[in-house]
Amino acid sequence: MLSTHPAGVQSGRQFLPKVTDASPNQELLPLTARINSSDRLEIGGCDVTTLVEQFGSPLYILDEDTLRNACCQYREAFKKYYPGESQVLYASKAWSCLAVCAIASQEGLGIDVVSGGELYTALQAGVSPDKLYLHGNNKSLEELKLAINSGCTIVVDNWHELRTLGHWSSVIGNSDTNDPVRIMLRLTPGIECHTHEYIRTGHLDSKFGFDPNQLDEVFAFVSQHSALNCVGLHAHIGSQIFEQQPHQDLAGVMVQWLDKASSYGLQMQELNVGGGLGIRYTEADDPPSIEAWVKGVCTAIQNACVTQQIALPKLLCEPGRSLIGSACVTAYTVGSSKTVPGIRTYIAIDGGMSDNPRPITYQSVYRAVVANKMSAPATQTVTIAGKHCESGDILIKEATLPPSEPGDILVVLATGAYNYSMASNYNRLARPAAVVVKAGEANVILRRETYQDLMRQDCLPARLSSET
Ligand code: LLP
């Protein structure tokens, strides 16, 4: 039997009622999180501790309702605030796999892919090519050909790619239809925002996109290549952004570029303002809601179009983190511990930087709870250590938790974005399984790797074999 209160997080206790009606990106927990009568955390109607018994540890647990809710909030907000056509794309770099692409696609989203592998995954998930956009600052010829042959839109990043496409599109065109190749142009808007420098992309000193100073040359080139159908412009200013102003400034700048394109006879109808809306990883994070973000962008685009006196373009955006980040948690099993007197207590779990490389890469801060004792008072501050041979393999430097013991299930929150997709096999750890939960049912969406999986690319030349 479920307790009457939904789960939320507050200091002192592990869980108290959460904010209601908030946007998923403003929640620490998946929307369906509850504490059940056994005092355990439940997500999507499934007891997390039981899921670990069933599917093993560590385990990524994706809440389908939260992901669908976030997709729906983006979709509906565009309907509400933008009178023109719009399309939300899921930035699948956040987590690319068949099930996630299928859910996003069922919710009416298109998919932003950034490699042949992500493109192949989205195609295999049944996503319609006219809703697929291929990004990347150094796409291979093979990736470009796959994109052209599958009929998706290519977001051209630089001169090398533009010239290559100018050549190839006239040679191979779109294999079935012979239509011109559908492209967009990515530009670097020169807009600064406050986020980690590794995940900032809109400032001029960025490896991505054309410099706006090159616009005239780029537009002239595109207008002379009839095998290229340039449908619009793209920019992305960075990730985990809480301020609204940079995206609104971006909207204004992009509409000016669109206007300029028309002076080259280019009839571009699409503007893609990228992704970047942040999420709440800890109580200290305070991102705007999905609806507020969409409203801000839509208003800015409409105002800029009035100023430039141009028709409303089809408006696209491509969020990743704010769609899937808070829909997933990672469950680990607590193992050893070590107290350094007067300094700290380390609690070790059975995963670490290989399943979540964000703390060691970006010094990201996460929140955790002990899933099998949800009402226990959080009286200890401990350091959650991973199991890798690396001192920096610390998942949470200061976690406030109830006293825990080996076998407890530690759950790290908001691990849906850039966790599985950035996971590695460092120290030959097998990647964990992932399950999707909904209405009390759990299904595997990514199988746990085995030792055989870890060896699948290994080759032992005969001369190195001990039998020769
Ligand atoms: N569009 C483009 C062109 C992007 O480069 C990105 C993210 C997105 C959309 C989606 O951004 P989002 O809505 O998820 O913020 N690994 C880093 C994040 C890298 C983001 C890369 N680009 C992290 O774990 O924080």
Image (cartoon, grey):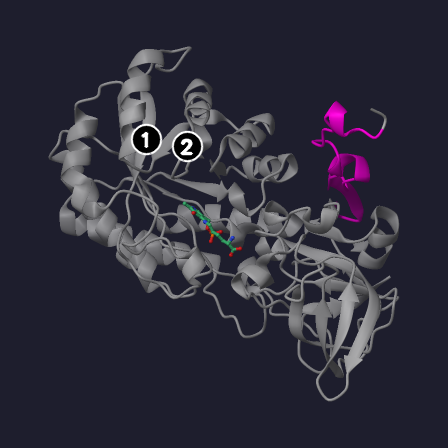
| Type of amino acid under label 1 | Glu
Q: Earlier in the sequence, mark 2 or mark 1?
A: 2
In the rendering, at what x and y percent does residue 192 appear?
Answer: 31, 61
Residue at the outermost bottom position = 342
Whether residue 457 appears in magenta in the rendering, the answer is yes
At 76% from the left edge and 51% from the top edge, which residue is drawn? Answer: 59
Question: Can you see residue 436?
Answer: no
In the rendering, at what x and y percent does residue 375 appear?
Answer: 80, 75
Where is mark 1, residue-wise?
161
- Say which of 467 and 371 sits in front: 467
In the rendering, at what x and y percent does residue 364 appear?
Answer: 56, 65
**Label 2: element kind:** loop
- Asked if marks 2 and 1 touch (Cβ < 8 Å), the reply is yes
Whether residue 377 appears in magenta in the rendering, the answer is no
In the rendering, at what x and y percent does residue 224 appear?
Answer: 17, 23
Query: Residues under labels 2 and 1: Cα distance?
Result: 7 Å
**Label 1: element kind:** helix
User: Could you classify mark 1 by the number of other residues whose Cα lies within 10 Å: few (under 14), some (14-19), or many (20 or more)?
Assistant: some
Tell me the quarter of the image containing the C terminus.
Answer: top right
Where is mark 2, residue-wise?
139
Tell me the quarter of the image containing the N terminus.
Answer: bottom right
**Residue 389 falls in image quadrant:** bottom right
The residues colored magenta run 437-466
At 47% from the left edge and 22% from the top edge, which residue is drawn? Answer: 146
| Type of amino acid under label 2 | Lys
Is residue 181 positioned above or below 218 on the image?
above
User: Could you classify mark 2 by the number of other residues whose Cα lies within 10 Å: few (under 14), some (14-19), or many (20 or more)?
Assistant: some
**Residue 404 falls in image quadrant:** bottom right
At 72% from the left edge and 32% from the top edge, which residue is drawn? Answer: 458
